[in-house]
Amino acid sequence: MTETAEPSSSAVFRAAQWLRARWSGFFVTSAALLIPCFWHRHIQACDLGSHLYTAWLTQSVSRGLLPGLHLGRQYTNVLVDLLLSKLFPYFGAIGTERLVVGLCVLIFFWGAFAFASAAARRAAWNAAPLLAMVAYGAIFHWGFFNFYLSAGLSFFALAIVVSGTGKDLILLPVLLVLSAVAHPLGAACLLALGAYLAALRWIPAKHHLPMTMLLVGFAFGVWAYLVRHFLVLQREIHMYWLLGADQLVVFGRGYLWLGVAALATCAVCVFMALRKTPIADILPWLQFYLAIALVVAFAPGGLASESTFGMMGYLPDRGSLYSAVALATLVACCRPRLWFTASCAILAVIFFTAIYHDTGILDRRNTKVAELVSACPGRRVIAMIRPIPGSRIHEDHALDRACIGQCYAYTNYEPSSGQFRLRADPGNRFIEMDQDALDAIQDGSYIVQPRDLPVYEVYQCGAGVNDLCLAELHDGQQIRDVPGITTTP
């Protein structure tokens, strides 16, 4: 990442040289990146609430204090959960989430930055504002942190594939294993993209286009096989024509225009570069970006198989994270002038201002839910809470977070999914495991059974996003049959 080191030297050595020469920029940038992890009482990232809640449960489960709950052997989709569980006893919920999420943000950003820099053969500061927005985009706010961390680790490995020497190759197996422990999809992307980039590096340029077409054809062949042999899940959104810029579409329609503006700015940058820069410097990365974006745009929403891996959802949402970083890498290779960086910086200011506003609403919701459930310590609680209108993030785990140290989130999804460390036996008193019951609770048609009691419900009791109330449910009651207004504690 330094312009002064010999290209033949180790990539790790060049990175160390760059860090020693630019340490102040590194630390200032890192500090700025971490601001959103501290600007509210809690970090607002959907599934994070559930992961923190299970990290709290794990403390009691490991001591055998919650009969019917146990920890299963988990070799993938687990790295962030292990970090949360190990740090929770020492730093509590707030300290743990900031340490772990902050670490994930730094690994993702600097991994993507290292990859873009390796491709551009210079430090990719011109793409830094775009990468910062992507770091706090849709995947971050969904709270898919195992995948997010896996992607960050994979970008460090891909940077080595692009510009490393034989001395650096020893790091690739280490990064692959860590990426796989974090999430299998990130490890799969590392293998596929690593093979492609290695071929781009070592075969003659005249074969690049056929090889790219072969890669795209292979990917579509894999999709065709998978959709024939597994249950296909519906897509969540249809914004993948934004080609990676959809990562900026988070809470409402206003973010759509931010994504459009970012994509248009990048398109102008690439167009101008193609007129002035040798095409051989740009074409491989244009092909790389378009290949990923095309595969992601036509990917199924998700896959499911009860007999094998369970469910893998939000495939296009996850894949577009790679499209977004590939786009940032492409513009870094175009070596844009100051206008591009300034334009992206303005978009970043607008983006983070909007994120601050919308996550503030969610933070106030967390506080309200915590106040409500404090009235039912040690009890089972369910929640029917509407998302922010127009939000891409349509699930809410405010109850899980609020129950930490106070109650039991009866509908926590992790044990029933079978994809996380925490497992639960049918009939346990802490987490509902019957999938039909969980589906009925989600749509409000569930009838309370004697085995559920005592159980409470947090529900929407007014038109406002945070107009929430608490009610105790009774045997035979339908969970949507609650008073319009309930006095809050």
Image: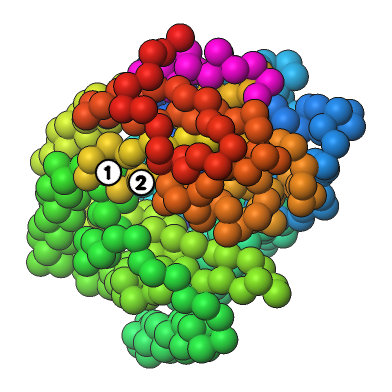
Does residue 288 appear anywhere in the picture?
no
Q: Residues within 10 Å of mark 2 (few under 14, many from 20)?
A: some
Does residue 189 appear anywhere in the picture?
yes
On screen, residue 89 above or below 81: above
Magenta span contains residue 371: yes
Instruction: Looking at the picture, tell me which residue is in the foreground, 248 or 212.
Output: 248
The answer to which image quadrant residue 482 occupies is top left
Hey, what amino acid is under mark 2? His
Measured as percent of width and height from the top left, residue 378 is found at 68, 20
On screen, residue 283 above or below 389: below
Q: Main secondary structure of the magenta part?
A: helix
From this viewpoint, which residue is outermost toward the right? Answer: 64
Q: Residue at x 53, y 47 (%)?
A: 447
Measured as percent of width and height from the top left, residue 455 is found at 60, 30
Q: Quote the CA–CA distance across marks 2 and 1.
A: 6 Å
- Which quadrant would the N terminus be assigned to in this image? top left
For this view, does 278 lie left or right of residue 394? left
Image mark for residue 394: 2
Instruction: Looking at the picture, tell me which residue is in the foreground, 442 or 447.
Output: 447
Hey, what amino acid is under mark 1? Ser
Q: Residues within 10 Å of mark 1 (few under 14, many from 20)?
A: some
Instruction: Looking at the picture, tell me which residue is in the foreground, 477 or 99.
Output: 477
Please state the extent of the stretch shown in magenta in the rendering: 364-379
Q: Which residue is label 1 attached to?
A: 391
Measured as percent of width and height from the top left, residue 101 is found at 53, 31
For this view, does 170 lie left or right of residue 229? right
Disc 1 is placed on an element classified as loop
Q: Residue at x 76, y 33 (%)?
A: 58
Disc 2 is placed on an element classified as loop
Q: What is the total number of numbered labels drawn onto the structure image?
A: 2
